[in-house]
Image (spheres, rainbow, N blue to C red):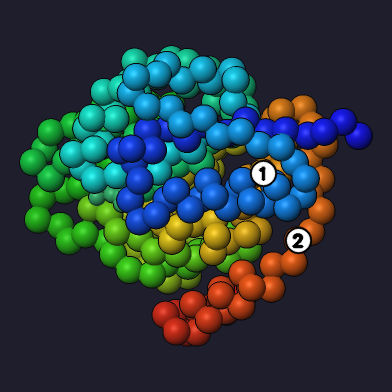
Amino acid sequence: MSQRTLNIAHLYPDLLNLYADRGNILTLVQRLRWRGIDVTVTEVTHRDTPRLSAYDLVLLGGGSDREQEIVGEYLYKFHEDFRQAIENGLPVLAICGGYQLLGAYYQLPNGQKVAGLDVLDLYTSAGTGLPRLIGNVAIDSPYGVIMGFENHGGRTIHHHDPLGKILQGHGNDGESGFEGVHYKNVWGTYIHGPLLPKNPGFADAVLATALEYAGQPATLEPLDDHVEQNARRAFLARRMPEVDI
Ligand code: GLN
């Protein structure tokens, strides 16, 4: 078998980097290296034009309202390229503020709308006088129980598939019982943690999708995840004892 290799783009790491979202990149890189798969990570900043055809996976982290306003402007210039790439199956993982930026807009508490990429049929509003949705969160998903931490003012509404059903926490809007979005090879979620170190099964699902998109064998040899699994059980026992895995 020829050497496998993945090209990952980390978009605006200097602006979208809340709650250690960079840990998601570290997890992807390490899980590839443990399996002898080559990986390059390109950090795309506002000075660069994202060359979407060069990447097998794109990551967007979370950000404060102010940072989202800045990133929204940069991103919008490329929204047509993004739409096409996503329709063609480009894998994208977007967290919180990054998730919100996949939609038509993010409406700030003062009513001002930050335009998003508009690549998914979703929108987000922070509302006026509404509390932030904060706390530990666990969801039932096709990748098993995904757990982490959420802290967002925005409420996201969409009619795509969710990433999962809320077991504990608030999720998309605090009311629907759903968390995140899954459309083609795009996943959006409010879950920080960071997300992927806490959820190695989901990390591998993202990697397998990216390998397949890159036209390479997508089978991933199992890793010894007992440390991660112990951490998951300990986190649930301490923070969300009603949730079982
Ligand atoms: N600024 C957004 C909100 O509060 C996203 C925050 C985040 O990325 N954690 O809804």
Which image quadrant for residue 105?
Answer: top left
- The amino acid at mark 2 is Leu
Q: Secondary structure at mark 1?
A: helix
Expressed as whole percent of the image width and height from the top left, the position of residue 35 reads: 77, 49
Residues at marks 1 and 2 touching, judged by CB atoms closer than 8 Å: no
- The amino acid at mark 1 is Leu
Left or right: residue 40 versus residue 175 is right
The residue shown at (74%, 66%) is 224
Residue behind label 2 places its C-beta within 8 angstroms of ligand 1:
no
Task: Tally the marks.
Answer: 2
Expressed as whole percent of the image width and height from the top left, the position of residue 76 reads: 33, 20
Q: Which residue is mark 2?
A: 223
Q: State which quarter of the image contains the N terminus.
A: top right
Q: Which mark is residue 108?
A: none
The residue shown at (26%, 23%) is 73
Left or right: residue 122 versus residue 54 is left
User: Front-most of 148 and 28?
Assistant: 28
Left or right: residue 197 versus residue 22 is right
Expressed as whole percent of the image width and height from the top left, the position of residue 62 reads: 35, 46
Cα separation, mark 1 vs mark 2, equals 13 Å
Expressed as whole percent of the image width and height from the top left, the position of residue 95 reads: 42, 46
Q: Which residue is mark 1?
A: 207
Residue behind label 1 places its C-beta within 8 angstroms of ligand 1:
no
Q: Does residue 155 appear anywhere in the picture? A: no
Left or right: residue 183 versus residue 131 is right
